Amino acid sequence: MVNRCTAIPRLLWLANVIIALAHTGLRISELAGLRWSDVDLNSNTIRVADERSSRRKRKASAMRITKGRRSRVIPIHPRLRQLFEGLSRKPDGRVLHAERGGVLRPNNVLHTFICDVIESLKEKFPTPADEIGFEHGRLHSFRHFSAAKPFSGVPRRERSRSGSATPTASKMVEHYCHPRNEAAQRKMEQIDFIVEEDEEGITQEQVVFREALRAKMKALRVELAGSNPTPIERLLVERVVACWLQLAHADCMAAQARPASIAEGNYIQRRQDRAHRRYLSAIKMLAVVRKLALAIRVDLNLASRPLPEHAEPAPESRPRALAHSAEN
């Protein structure tokens, strides 16, 4: 989405909105009302203000409110900080603006988001029939994404202890968003909310990993095949490489898994064991075929070797030849 917006000059403002929504979990109305006075780059935090208690704000019809009826503080992600540092500060004090520097209107932002982003990319990210998918994404979806992202890899029991996955109801997310908690700031820096993708939707990190994996598999094929492999050996080498890849994947999944039950842990272990047995079986079959092929090559070489013209007499004929020479 960000790449789509940055590629079109008139949508650069929408790219900034998407980055801010994804990294803060703010509602679009809260983001539209965000001012530079709410952003503290020294403490690396954003204050989302609820001004119901301010009489002066109510009289001036400039009161900002939140759905939770209270103010909250959010840590600033490094990517979001980079965005803030690159923005120019305008006289109205608002952080983000629309296409021509105007005030962000939630309905207008939503309309532009649907027409220029969702509709343009929905063929690239198709949604199965009777399911909710990419084409149903709206601005509020970034709030759910931002709240769920920190729970990636967290065991189910930890998620259930936190109650709800919303920033206001979850004790875990409340602890995570505490502005004075240095661990929360470090956690925020570790989360990659938006990754750079190429035209095929593959991130740069995935491209590097893919090329490294291909180079490793190619080196493994060359090492196992040798200088002059037979067709059967080539097939078995491919099988060994495929089983190696399956085993490596099973090992990685087992190392990263956090099973919620004993049955789930046993399934992961059995999957790893089966991949290991297949790998050893493929190696054994390649070794057996190589051993048989070597024996056949040795027999063929001996059979095709020509006999010398002046062969030495057989061992049993030597005594007779010595006796005959002694008589003479």
Image (cartoon, rainbow, N blue to C red):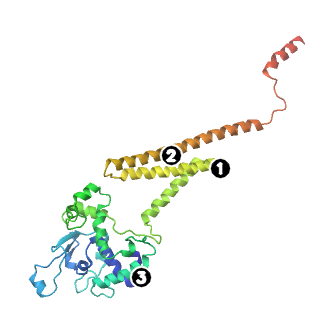
Q: Name, please, the residue furthest toward the top.
A: 327
For mark 2, what is the residue? 279
Q: Nearer the viewer, mark 1 or mark 3?
A: 1
User: Distance of mark 3 from mark 2, alpha carbons?
Assistant: 50 Å
For mark 3, what is the residue? 8
Q: As shown in the figure, which amino acid type bears the numbered disc 3?
A: Ile
The image position of residue 99, as x and y in percent, is 33, 86
User: Distance of mark 2 from mark 1, alpha carbons?
Assistant: 20 Å
Q: Name, please, the residue furthest toward the right.
A: 328
Which element is circle 1 on?
helix
Q: Residues within 10 Å of mark 1 (few under 14, many from 20)?
A: few
Residue 98 figure quarter: bottom left
**Circles 2 and 1 in contact, beta carbons < 8 Å:** no
Q: Is residue 318 left or right of residue 277?
A: right
Mark found first going from the N terminus, 1 or 3:
3
Q: Residues within 10 Å of mark 2 (few under 14, many from 20)?
A: many
Q: Which mark is residue 145?
A: none
